[in-house]
């Protein structure tokens, strides 16, 4: 659909595809929470403060908006991160994206 | 011992407005907050950010809102304990409560209101085998309170954020051996701190292990060794230590409140929407820390919850007493 982004969530059992609106100003953390992904806590409600919404972006990483300093420094404090680590609260679901594939670390 | 009618845990906007609402009912409040000042995350994290959804204020800066709430609460002479974390809560005489903070301050109250927002910020722990065994003064600390504790000791710091860099610089002149373990190949903290760490490494005051993760900790009663894995080469190094200090930032958690027997759902306290009381009589939870169906984590919703809670708390403290609600437009604000 024209106004949707296909969000693929990979896990050990396979992949799940969800459709997210690209015109509601949502971020990925809010979308994942709305879809009951309990591992995504988003305790600070999306102000890049708690790093409880850490995801690995497997596809479309280069299309995402550049990280702000707060996100870079916060990711740096986590015990384990990856080259494709992002805070999902900082990923805007907007018209720049048609699809994104992520993995939620344990 | 501090004695009050209502002990409010958390001095954020909702806790502050609760002073006003309970004050109108002639109830006195004492507030306790782990942060050194009132305002909660508004003051601590985003004081200059504009807020757009406070009724009557098309826009208001976060700190300005807190200043106004403090002013509004002033007639009711609230008292505060700052910089202390609430540790335990005991019910006495089936009705009253004694709250004790981590520094031993005791507060005797008839009602407890938890307005703790995000909760307390607690250190994030890495997944390392055997870590718990050496917590509580047996060699592993997650924050540095007194750097002198590490004088002439062998210390391993782990982490790559500003906090790890700053403490590495500080401890380099205190510890007898200092190793900084970081998982990636470079530091992304403030350039000044990074440069200083590089300089101290060249001067052999800090040993830096990059591409490295903590793997295991060992010791009999006290911590003795830390095993470090180099993720690039898969080499394992065992370092003799007195102290290991993992510094992986802070994450908001409910903290000791989670152990008070309250019904908790996903890091929030379940409440009865009739009056925002918890499953324990005399304890209420308002603001971002509570949860119920259709909960909206908005300051304005917290204000509403504070007003409803105040009337319920009045009835709890004064059983059988009749009270007719008065409007401030009619009776004004009668200060204590």
Image: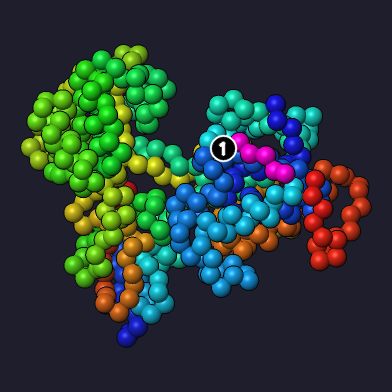
- The residue that appears at 59% across and 25% down in the rendered structure is B104
To which residue does mark 1 refer? B82
- Residue B79 rendering spot, x and y as whole percentages: 67, 39
Badge 1: how crowded within 10 Å, few (<14), some, or many (20+)?
some
Q: Identify the chain of the residue marked 1, using the numbered disc in the image.
A: B
- The residue that appears at 21% across and 51% down in the rendered structure is A82
- Residue B58 rendering spot, x and y as whole percentages: 56, 73
Give the vertical position of B244 relative to A16 (above or below).
above
- The residue that appears at 55% across and 50% down in the rendered structure is B39
Q: Residue A97 colored magenta?
A: no
Left or right of A27 on screen, residue B15:
right
- The residue that appears at 55% across and 26% down in the rendered structure is B103
Occupied quadrant, residue B224: top left
Occupied quadrant, residue A44: bottom left
Q: Is residue B282 visible?
A: no
Q: Secondary structure at mark 1?
A: strand
Residue lying at the far bottom in this picture: please name it.
A2
**Quarter occupied by the N terminus of chain B:** top right
Q: Residue B80 colored magenta?
A: yes
Q: Is residue A24 visible?
A: yes
Write the start and end of the magenta stretch as one range: B77-82
Left or right of A89 on screen, residue B218:
left
Give the vertical position of A54 relative to B327 (above or below).
above
**Quarter occupied by the C terminus of chain B:** top right
Q: Main secondary structure of the magenta part?
A: strand
- Residue A22 rendering spot, x and y as whole percentages: 35, 78
């Amino acid at each position: 659909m024209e106004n949707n982004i296909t969000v693929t969530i990979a896990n050990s059992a396979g992949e799940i595809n969800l459709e997210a609106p690209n015109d509601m100003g949502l971020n990925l953390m809010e979308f994942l929470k709305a879809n009951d992904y309990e591992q995504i806590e988003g305790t600070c409600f999306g102000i890049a403060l708690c790093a409880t919404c850490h995801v690995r972006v497997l596809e479309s990483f280069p299309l995402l908006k550049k990280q702000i300093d707060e996100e870079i420094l916060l990711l740096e404090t986590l015990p384990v991160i990856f080259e494709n680590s992002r805070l999902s609260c900082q990923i805007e679901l907007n018209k720049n994206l048609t699809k994104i594939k992520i993995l939620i670390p344990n | 011992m501090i004695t009050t009618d209502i002990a409010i845990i958390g001095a954020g906007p909702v806790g502050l407005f609760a002073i006003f609402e309970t004050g109108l009912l002639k109830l006195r409040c004492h507030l306790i907050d782990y942060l050194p000042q009132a305002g909660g995350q508004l003051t601590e994290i985003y004081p200059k950010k504009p807020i757009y959804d406070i009724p009557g204020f098309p826009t208001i800066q976060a700190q300005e809102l807190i200043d106004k709430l403090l002013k509004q609460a002033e007639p009711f002479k609230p008292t505060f304990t700052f910089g202390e974390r609430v540790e335990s809560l005991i019910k006495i005489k089936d009705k009253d409560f004694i709250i004790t903070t981590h520094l031993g301050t005791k507060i005797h109250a008839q009602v407890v209101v938890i307005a703790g927002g995000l909760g307390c910020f607690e250190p994030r722990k890495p997944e390392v085998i055997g870590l718990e065994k050496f917590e509580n003064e047996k060699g592993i600390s997650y924050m540095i309170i007194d750097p002198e504790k590490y004088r002439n000791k062998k210390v391993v710091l782990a982490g790559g954020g500003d906090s790890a860099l700053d403490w590495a610089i500080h401890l380099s002149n205190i510890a007898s051996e200092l190793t900084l373990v970081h998982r990636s190949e470079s530091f992304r903290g403030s350039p000044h701190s990074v440069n200083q760490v590089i300089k101290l490494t060249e001067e052999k005051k800090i040993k830096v292990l990059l591409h490295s993760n903590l793997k295991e900790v060992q010791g009999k009663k006290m911590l003795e060794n830390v095993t470090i894995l180099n993720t690039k080469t898969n080499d394992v190094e065992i370092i003799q230590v007195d102290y290991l200090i993992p510094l992986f930032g802070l994450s908001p958690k409910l903290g000791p409140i989670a152990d008070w027997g309250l019904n908790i759902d996903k890091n929030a306290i379940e409440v009865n929407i009739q009056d925002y009381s918890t499953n324990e009589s005399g304890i209420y939870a308002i603001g971002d820390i509570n949860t119920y169906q259709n909960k909206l984590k908005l300051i304005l919703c917290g204000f509403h919850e504070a007003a409803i809670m105040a009337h319920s708390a009045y009835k709890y403290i004064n059983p059988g007493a009749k009270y007719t609600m008065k409007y401030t437009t009619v009776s004004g604000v009668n200060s204590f």
